[in-house]
Amino acid sequence: MPDSTLDLTRDLADLATLATSDEADLDDMLRRGLDWLAKLAPYDLACVFQLEGDQLVVRAMRGPLARAEVRSHRLDLDAFPTIREALETRRARAYTEDDHAHGDGDPFDGVIDLPAGHACMVVPLAAGERAFGVLSLDRRECVTYPQAVVDLVEIYGRILALAIRSAEQSASLARLGAQSREHARLLEERIEGGEEGGVLETSASPAVRELARKARQVAATTTPVLILGETGTGKERLAHAIHRWSARRDRPFVVVNCAAIPEGLLESELFGHDRGAFTGATRERSGRFRTANGGTLFLDEIGELPLELQAKLLRVLQTGELQSVGSDRTIKVDVRIVAATHVDLARAVEEGRFREDLYYRLDVFPLRLPALRERLEDLPALCEHLLADQRARTGRRGVHATREAIEALARHRWPGNIRELANVLERAAILSASGALGPVDLGMSERAPVSTKKARGGDGELVSLAENERRHIAAVLRATEGRIYGERGAAKILGVPPSTLQSRMKKLGLDPAGAR
């Protein structure tokens, strides 16, 4: 047991901080977590098993019995029903001598030599819906772990699982950052030729052409710009066009999605931190503002920015100065702010979710992007633009939307706007045997057509959002013959993780086999 609750609390805080640091390494964090666990329950072997399908694979181990042969050890859950039960019930279990004799048997039988009736405990590692795996503790001493110790280790396992999830999120953010930089590089190459701005300026919609004219005017200034519009209307593309039209075109264009970064990481992500600012901060981090110095910082989903950070953002806008986390130094920055949101900021101000002074600071020059349903005359050009992008990425030539496909596309509301259109076209391009995409390839028969009249049933039926989602997922499952995983799986086509798709299917009552 630990000398004091304070010592254990400090260790857990260190573990959580390490999990969310820039240099979070899951294996290192797990090893430290197992070292700290020894203060709660002594062991000769502690293993973290990661769940892979129906098998458990050793991910980290500590203790005198942590040998090379343990590292490659795997457990089949079908052979250990009590371990599966621990995972399903989310409850830790200490094994008795009777369990060893008449239960599942020893998980390490044939791998390491442990006496019959030795102390053994299995603890599930799960956070939310995510089951990472299990933690096992084994001791040569032939006694059962006391229930009080089992209860404490169960709580520790929950905290360790949360730390694992945080570390995975940090790693995912790092990968997303690398992907975003590559995407920005490719986008920059296209924009050099004026393609993004050209799509706006040559639009068949008078409203979009007027929007492009105003965007060009404000691009020549340093005035903050607030881009409004529904999700998927192309707010980031417009922000990038403004940057390319400005005098800052040769300086960085940096993107921050305020809704995609955990709140605990967002301040450091924006303003940076000094080395030693907190446990795990082993090096200085410059932050996005300093990275964008001299250029443009695009704050997407600004409406999701926490109130505390709104005050700090306002200070940077007013003074051009910032302080990184853990520093008393003031740093001057020259950054042009372009923000975007799909929420009603004026209402958010009334509800106390957004600072009024920051709102008026950003709302100097608002630009509203029309929804796709308000600019259907642009469908032919948008389809060609999006398919040209796909041809460049995939190398598949000749893919195009037929006249019948354009007519079918024009009959639908597109709640997901241009992003949804891009996904539909990409899915159709993958599944189509020829390069000519027709209504069937696009799956248009599965979508509710535009109608402002009273629902009369049949093809003109107006349905709920959940029903529309159910029908769309069912159509994709039929097209993929029930396949969820892989490059041609439904999850890839829909642009969601397989686990998320399976969760939605369960909620909507969809079965892959029944959807064929």
Image (spheres, helix red, strand yellow):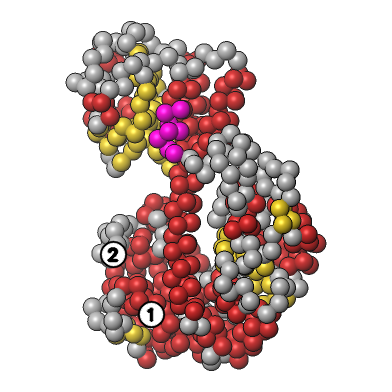
Q: Residue 134 or 338: which is nearer the viewer?
A: 338
N-terminal label among 1 and 2: 1
Q: Is residue 280 left or right of residue 58?
A: right
Q: Residue 388 or 453: which is nearer the viewer?
A: 388
What type of secondary structure mainly makes up the magenta span? helix
| In the rendered image, the vertical position of residue 412 relative to residue 23, given as above or below | below
What is the secondary structure assignment of the residue under circle 2?
loop
> Is residue 93 at least partly visible in the picture?
yes
Q: Which mark is residue 387?
A: 1
How far across and down, in percent of the image, does residue 318 sit?
78, 61
Q: Residue 174 or 232: which is nearer the viewer?
A: 174
Q: How far is disc 1 from disc 2 in space, using C-alphas?
A: 18 Å
Residue type beneath disc 1:
Leu
| In the rendered image, the vertical position of residue 496 relative to residue 414, given as above or below | above
Mark 2 — residue?
Answer: 488
Q: Which mark is residue 312?
A: none
How far across and down, in percent of the image, does residue 298 sit?
61, 65
> Is residue 308 at least partly visible in the picture?
no
Residue type beneath disc 2:
Arg
Residue that appears at 56% across and 72% down = 250
Location of the C terminus (image quadrant): bottom left
Looking at the rendering, which quadrant does residue 423 occupy? bottom left
How far across and down, in percent of the image, does residue 135 sit?
39, 28
Q: Which residues are magenta?
A: 25-32
Q: Residues within 10 Å of mark 1 (few under 14, many from 20)?
A: many
Please tell me how many numbered marks the rendered image carries. Answer: 2
Residue that appears at 32% across and 27% down = 82
| In the rendered image, the vertical position of residue 28 relative to residue 474, given as above or below | above
How far across and down, in percent of the image, does residue 143 sit?
37, 8
Q: Is residue 12 left or right of residue 488?
A: right
